[in-house]
Amino acid sequence: MNEWFAVVNPISFLAFLVLTGYIGERTQYVPKIRESLSQIITRITLPVLVVVSLSNQNLSDIPIFNILIVLASGVTAISLLLIINYPLGKLLRVPLERQLIHSFLGSFGNVIFLGYPVILYLFGEIGLLYAIIFSMANELIVWTFGAYLLNSKSQVNAKKWDIKYLFNPNTVSFIIGISMLLLGLRFPSIVNAPLERLGAATTPLSMLFIGSILARTELIKAIKNVSIWSVCLIKMILIPSLFMFGAGLFFPSIQDINIIMLSVIALQMAMPSQTNLSVLADRYNSDPEYAAQTIFVTTLFSAITLPLMYFFCLYIFSKPV
């Protein structure tokens, strides 16, 4: 029962923040929340969070083989989901302007804002390290390939690929953070402490942003949207379950494989849609309302699916120690 509450509590916290943003926008208590927060998150707090979270870690305690497994699993899962969700969006008759963001919502998960606190509680510091490694694959793809596709799609006269699409505050922060991680560089404590607090503001700000968008959406309509539930089914249940079945079959033939690592990979795959996609959709004019609706439904649904996936991990892999 404690594990169940460990998964549900962070979701309840996020829901409270979303409700706050919803009320603030709906009542116009704080006007223009959406416009201001979009800039603050993408240009300030999220880049700081990425750099600090990477530079504060120590990879010396994790075998290179395990790192490669986590990275390969992340890239493979995201690639498979992208391959599935884009044509599925067409099959489900998702409107043309939201097909791309639909495929992203069904492929990229909330592996930082929700993944980190849940996995830290369930598996401790070693689990958090694996979660961060998985997030490298998720974040690097979404802020390079994803941002490039959304940006190029929003350019009316764009006819060819331009490398400038790949350079944004978040990809630059990833380069800085990974460089510091590999070189073993860290900020002095007098600098690191305020940066940590600034980066931590990304989570509540993102939730307030989502709430402000939801204030302008029809939530009943979102719940009835079949394409949103396809994201829940495929991303949050099907793909992580297939991974667990596959790893469970392959596991006996591998010596010294880390069970916690496999469990973290499965749970990161099962995370709801990434909250920052609503910000990206807003900046690149790719239906932010639909993005917010999908994030709302998948995050709400994860209160059921994440605990189930965790207990499924225990059954398949045996209890991590």
Image (spheres, rainbow, N blue to C red):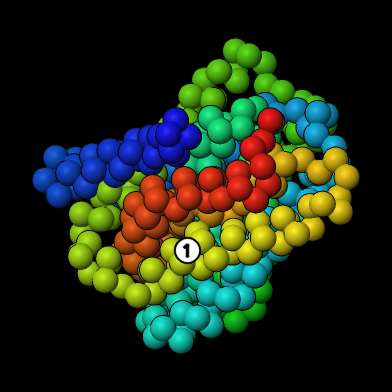
Q: Residue furthest left?
A: 27
Tell me which corner region of the image, top left, top right, bottom left or bottom right, holds residue 301. bottom left
Tell me which corner region of the image, top left, top right, bottom left or bottom right, holds residue 152. bottom right
The quarter in which the C terminus is drawn is: top right
Where is residue 285 drawn, in percent x and y? 39, 67
Does 39 sit above or below residue 298?
Answer: above
Does 209 sit above or below residue 156?
Answer: above
Q: Is residue 128 left or right of residue 215?
A: right
Does 4 sit above or below residue 253?
Answer: above
Where is residue 62 drawn, in percent x and y? 80, 34
For this rendering, which residue is in front, 224 or 257?
A: 257
Where is residue 223 drawn, in percent x and y? 27, 66
For badge 1, the amino acid type reads Leu
Q: Which residue is mark 1?
A: 105
For this rendering, which residue is in front, 267 or 103?
A: 267
Q: Residue at x 48, y 34 (%)?
A: 3
Does 287 sit above or below residue 187?
Answer: below
- Does residue 210 appear anywhere in the picture? yes
Where is residue 220 drawn, in percent x and y? 20, 65
Q: Residue at x 50, y 59 (%)?
A: 236
- Does residue 150 appear anywhere in the picture? no
